[in-house]
């Protein structure tokens, strides 16, 4: 509705979408088979866990905080589930327990951050070390999940076949559902609105009577849940758990969120943008794999440059909108 | 800001934690404080002992201690170690001697001044911890302005990579300066690495202070891309070198201690003097406290911030050289991996607030030693390094809570509501 | 608009990188290879062997991808190979588990898979055609046998373990322990992970040498050469003679280690041959021609110590 009144807000996200299509186009022109629907579908399959993790990260960043424990929580939940199934417990129980631990862990982090006004960077950094260490305590070796009825059911019956070699997997459906829920939550609910208010100006939000503490703790709890869910998805995706996996994934998630148009100082951006952030990251990687001759480390360098470009753009927009509001 | 009564307050909790850890080791880890004095025959130190080949062999040693005697007063040694750790600041005089040491070993023969050096776990902690200590010095200044630099690990990798690349080119004679001979030309890669790292810091500073980008994101760029750059410099290879000068940095000894420790001391003294004896430190604190107010007060807030990132980059370069020197090769994949986190932890444990505004260089050094002691203790106790993260995280949270004024106030208010107010103020 | 310029520049950079490649020659065998990373000299040699061999052969068109030691990258790469429509997929798995789904997908697409260097753990047979490479357990056994033969029935061993949880670390440890199980005189008195890197190998060895058991250590068993090379430095700094006071056995067989053995600073390295590019593409060509290949192809490897290492061997070593 306000679309035409405040187009500035939509510039970053439209730029992300533009970049996505440009990169996609480059791929289609340069390589045969790049345009096949399978490549597009695989983007979702291979990045579903990253996408779910990025949703949590996006919400936390919108409050002006940061969550570095994402990758570790994914590794921990996946190894916990694999270990529990290997020692004979029901997969559903394992998944429920893993999600519960994620929620509790997120809540604990939020509590420490809010109640003792410790910096989020530090608390989640310690959380990252802690939970990865816990993963190694569960098992130092990777464990495969074999012949589990629940996992087989997910694999065989919850997959929608779209044609030869193309399956809409359960994990993709989970991602899309969570994404829609998160978009609705952040745009249409009171708590979601509070997140924006806190990220924009915490003091003002407090004065307005917004329950800052509760909202913050809730956001970190949601982030913990998203990370744990990403871990569950990861376990389904790999049918295995490995405490070494997803090292540094939090940085990918943050990069995806920034590329997706969210301002790191909080208050500005859309959860929806993280989808395209994740897709752009995945697409660049695909492009480099398809080429197969250039050094894979270019992925990192290009992602770095992209992040930089988006930061510049956001900075510019902030300045322009500031000067506009002054002149008005 | 800090009056003498208050001066060492910030050091209390880190020092208490360190003391507890050392006490634990004194009781439960045998030989922890055993320090030996070793002597080495400096004349033969570099010539390959095997005497087989004229070509230098990677993996060969440059230190060949001939004999050593054990000093068995472990209590005495412990006291020494503690004194060194706590009072590093007091050693300004020796430091200048440490600087003098550089020209002497250039001929690649005198590996250790006076031929003696100390050998033991506490010395190892200082040596291995030197990288994080150097990083923490730069990080402290950046954090004091309210910023953060998460790219230092990647910058370390770049510095090590360029140094190793240049030294290998020089050894092969493919670079300007090769004519100077290996005993002199090692200075070229060292300078190149430092310049490059300083440039990296300059870049970060430009993004943060010049363009006003949030520090976390601005440095994220280099963190993500930097390791890729290092990989490209070395072409993905691990480049080994055995130039005596370069190797000396983290393996040589001067005045009984590893040379790297003297580098830390030198940097501490330089930046300590710079921040406490000039207005620079006050400016940093002022910018960290309230940037806008300081600007109105006539402080060039931007320039101050920029400078801290440059310093941080320089420190990362030194740390990168130390890391490469330690293992005599540049390993772009692993050099400095996650060390940015250790450096930030060390800084925060040392009492510097992440919100900016006050900083304690000495505290950061103690923090770095604390982290390294923890790691070494785990090695000595045969704890799997993967699990090391768990106690590390808990120590960090506990120390942070102890440093947090809110936490103190809450705890105090439980005991006595009156005391609470006094505690916060 | 100004801001779009930056974005477009980034995109243009990507285009630059990509242009020039594409439209492949259909007569060639398209091979997709996913490497673990570039974490050690050994791995680098393996990569070069594969790339070099692919260039030599006119019949092969190689698509190479570096997973940067991350399984998630590797799975993405394999999926992309399938989409790209390569003829044969080969990869060196980061870990043993978690490849079942993607291998099934390759099978459905009718693309044969050749494993290289490390095996995978799958519940179904027929997901891969062949596995070329070393047997990590056997390497551990060989190292233990060398200790038995050259040090004797009584030895206190310090062990530098690889990255916790990684396949070579687990298997090499397993193989070593399997042999010494029957020889109670050989005891592992210290065991700690050195993460397969020199820096950690050195740091951990330093702490071993300061432990109360330091003087009892007679043998060092390192899971790779890089850690052993780091440990040699630590041993020398401690005033002991590596190779004499402490015998050093490690695995991989890189050139630097050979030089160390020749200089008397180390004793033995169990070869784990990375130069199996030729072997790999022989198999690929056979598969493409419709011939059957054995499911397990061991690479040719030896055990090297001071008895069989000469200057010529060192000079002839490519990595």
Image (spheres, coloured by chain):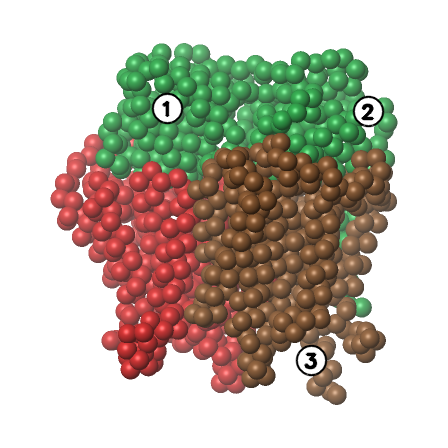
x then y, percent, for residue B405: 37, 73
Q: Which mark is residue A208?
A: none
Residue at 81% in and 54% down: A21
C241 vs A212, left or right, is left
Q: Which residue is mark 3?
A: A322
Mark 3 belongs to chain:
A
| Residue A240 or residue C315, whichever sits in front | A240
x then y, percent, for residue C174: 44, 24
Q: Which residue is mark 1?
A: C248
Q: For the residue labelled by badge 1, is the local secondary structure a helix, a strand or a loop?
A: strand
Q: Is residue A124 above or below residue C100?
A: below
The green chain is: C
Q: Which residue is mark 2?
A: C28
Q: Quadrant of residue B66?
A: top left
Q: Residues within 10 Å of mark 1 (few under 14, many from 20)?
A: many
Mark 1 belongs to chain:
C
Q: For the residue labelled by badge 3, is the local secondary structure a helix, a strand or a loop?
A: helix
C31 vs A257, left or right, is right
B234 vs B140, left or right, is right
Residue at 66% in and 29% down: C91
What's the distance in space between the residues labelled 2 and 3, CA to CA? 59 Å
The brown chain is: A
x then y, percent, for residue C220: 35, 26
Res A117 seen here: yes
What's the distance in space between the residues labelled 2 and 1, CA to CA? 46 Å
Mark 2 belongs to chain:
C
| Residue A193 or residue C170, whichever sits in front | A193
**Sequence-first disc among 2 and 1:** 2
């Amino acid at each position: 509705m306000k679309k035409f009144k405040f187009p500035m807000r939509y510039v970053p996200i439209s730029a992300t979408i533009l970049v996505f299509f440009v990169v996609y186009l480059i791929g289609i022109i340069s390589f045969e088979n790049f345009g096949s629907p399978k490549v597009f579908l695989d983007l979702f399959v291979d990045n579903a866990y990253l996408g779910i993790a990025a949703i949590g990260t996006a919400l936390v960043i919108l409050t002006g905080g940061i969550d570095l424990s994402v990758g570790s929580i994914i590794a921990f939940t996946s190894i916990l589930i694999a270990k529990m199934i290997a020692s004979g417990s029901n997969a559903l129980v394992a998944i429920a327990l893993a999600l519960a631990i994620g929620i509790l862990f997120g809540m604990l982090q939020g509590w420490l951050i809010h109640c003792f006004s410790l910096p989020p960077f530090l608390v989640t950094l310690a959380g990252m070390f802690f939970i990865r260490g816990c993963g190694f305590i569960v098992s130092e070796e990777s464990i495969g999940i074999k012949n589990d009825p629940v996992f087989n059911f997910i694999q065989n019956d919850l997959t929608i076949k779209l044609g030869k070699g193309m399956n809409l997997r359960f994990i993709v459906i989970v991602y899309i559902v969570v994404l829609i829920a998160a978009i609705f939550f952040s745009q249409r609910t009171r708590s979601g609105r509070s997140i924006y208010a806190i990220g924009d100006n915490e003091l003002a939000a407090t004065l307005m009577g917004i329950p800052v503490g509760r909202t913050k703790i809730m956001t970190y709890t949601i982030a913990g849940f998203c990370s744990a869910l990403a871990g569950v998805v990861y376990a389904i995706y790999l049918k295995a758990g490995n405490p070494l996996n997803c090292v540094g994934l939090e940085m990918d998630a943050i990069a995806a969120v920034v590329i997706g148009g969210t301002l790191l100082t909080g208050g500005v951006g859309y959860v929806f943008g993280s989808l395209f952030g994740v897709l752009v990251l995945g697409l660049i990687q695909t492009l480099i794999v398809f080429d197969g001759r250039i050094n894979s480390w270019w992925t990192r360098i290009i992602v770095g440059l992209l992040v930089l470009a988006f930061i510049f753009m956001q900075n510019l927009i902030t300045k322009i909108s500031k000067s506009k509001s002054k002149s008005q | 800001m800090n009056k003498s009564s208050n001066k060492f307050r910030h050091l209390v909790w880190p020092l208490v934690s360190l003391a507890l850890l050392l006490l634990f080791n004194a009781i439960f880890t045998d030989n922890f404080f055993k320090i030996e004095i070793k002597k080495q025959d400096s004349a033969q130190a570099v010539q390959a002992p095997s005497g087989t080949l004229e070509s230098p062999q990677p993996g060969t040693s440059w230190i060949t201690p001939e004999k050593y005697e054990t000093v068995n007063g472990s209590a005495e040694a412990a006291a020494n170690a503690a004194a060194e750790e706590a009072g590093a600041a007091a050693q300004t005089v020796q430091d200048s001697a440490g600087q003098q040491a550089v020209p002497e070993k250039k001929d690649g023969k005198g590996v250790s001044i006076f031929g003696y050096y100390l050998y033991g776990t506490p010395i190892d902690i200082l040596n291995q911890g030197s990288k994080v200590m150097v990083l923490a010095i730069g990080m402290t200044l950046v954090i004091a302005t309210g910023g953060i630099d998460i790219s230092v690990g990647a910058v370390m990798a770049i510095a090590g990579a360029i140094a190793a690349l240049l030294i290998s080119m020089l050894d092969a004679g493919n670079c300007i300066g090769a004519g100077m001979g290996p005993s002199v030309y090692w200075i070229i890669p060292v300078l190149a690495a430092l310049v490059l790292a300083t440039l990296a810091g300059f870049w970060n500073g430009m993004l943060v202070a010049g363009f006003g980008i949030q520090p976390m994101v601005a440095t994220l760029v280099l963190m993500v891309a930097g390791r890729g750059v290092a990989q490209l410099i070395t072409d993905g290879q691990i480049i080994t070198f055995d130039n005596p000068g370069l190797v000396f940095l983290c393996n040589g000894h001067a005045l009984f201690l590893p040379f790297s420790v003297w580098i830390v001391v030198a940097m501490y003294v330089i930046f300590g003097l710079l921040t406490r004896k000039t207005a620079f430190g006050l400016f940093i604190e002022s910018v960290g406290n309230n940037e806008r107010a300081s600007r109105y007060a006539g402080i060039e807030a931007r320039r101050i911030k920029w400078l801290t990132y440059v310093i941080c980059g320089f420190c990362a370069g030194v740390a990168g050289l130390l890391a490469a020197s330690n293992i005599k090769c540049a390993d772009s994949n692993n050099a400095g991996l996650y060390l940015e986190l250790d450096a930030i932890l060390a800084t925060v444990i040392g009492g510097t607030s992440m919100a900016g505004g006050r900083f304690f260089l000495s505290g950061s050094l103690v923090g770095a030693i604390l982290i390294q002691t923890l790691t070494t203790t785990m090695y000595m106790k045969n704890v799997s390094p993967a699990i090391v993260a768990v106690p590390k995280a808990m120590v960090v949270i506990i120390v942070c809570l102890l440093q947090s004024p809110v936490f103190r106030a809450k705890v105090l208010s439980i005991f006595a509501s009156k005391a609470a107010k006094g505690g916060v103020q | 608009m100004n801001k779009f310029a930056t974005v477009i520049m980034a995109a243009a950079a990507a285009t630059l990188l990509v242009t020039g490649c594409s439209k492949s020659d259909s007569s060639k065998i398209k091979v997709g290879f996913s490497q673990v990373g570039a974490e050690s000299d050994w791995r680098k040699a393996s990569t070069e062997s594969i790339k070099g061999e692919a260039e030599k052969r006119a019949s092969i068109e190689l698509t190479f991808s570096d997973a940067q030691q991350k399984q998630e990258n590797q799975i993405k790469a394999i999926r992309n190979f399938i989409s790209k429509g390569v003829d044969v997929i080969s990869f060196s798995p980061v870990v043993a588990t978690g490849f079942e789904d993607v291998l099934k997908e390759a099978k459905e697409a009718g693309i044969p898979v050749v494993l290289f260097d490390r095996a995978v753990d799958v519940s179904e047979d027929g997901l891969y055609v062949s596995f070329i490479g070393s047997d990590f357990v056997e390497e551990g056994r060989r190292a233990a046998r060398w200790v038995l033969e050259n040090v004797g029935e009584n030895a206190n061993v310090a062990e530098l373990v690889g990255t916790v949880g990684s396949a070579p670390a687990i298997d090499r440890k397993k193989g070593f322990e399997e042999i010494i199980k029957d020889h109670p005189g050989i005891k592992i008195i210290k065991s700690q992970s050195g993460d397969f890197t020199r820096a950690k190998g050195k740091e951990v060895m330093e702490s071993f040498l300061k432990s109360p058991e330091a003087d009892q250590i007679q043998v060092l068993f390192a899971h790779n050469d890089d850690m052993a090379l780091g440990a040699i430095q630590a041993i020398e700094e401690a005033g002991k003679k590596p190779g004499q006071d402490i015998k050093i056995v490690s695995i991989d067989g890189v050139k630097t280690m050979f030089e160390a053995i020749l200089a008397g600073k180390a004793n033995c390295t169990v070869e784990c041959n990375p130069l199996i590019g030729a072997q790999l593409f022989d198999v690929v060509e056979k598969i493409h021609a419709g011939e059957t290949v054995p499911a397990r192809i061991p690479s040719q490897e030896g055990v090297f110590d001071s008895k069989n290492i000469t200057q010529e061997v060192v000079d002839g070593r490519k990595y």
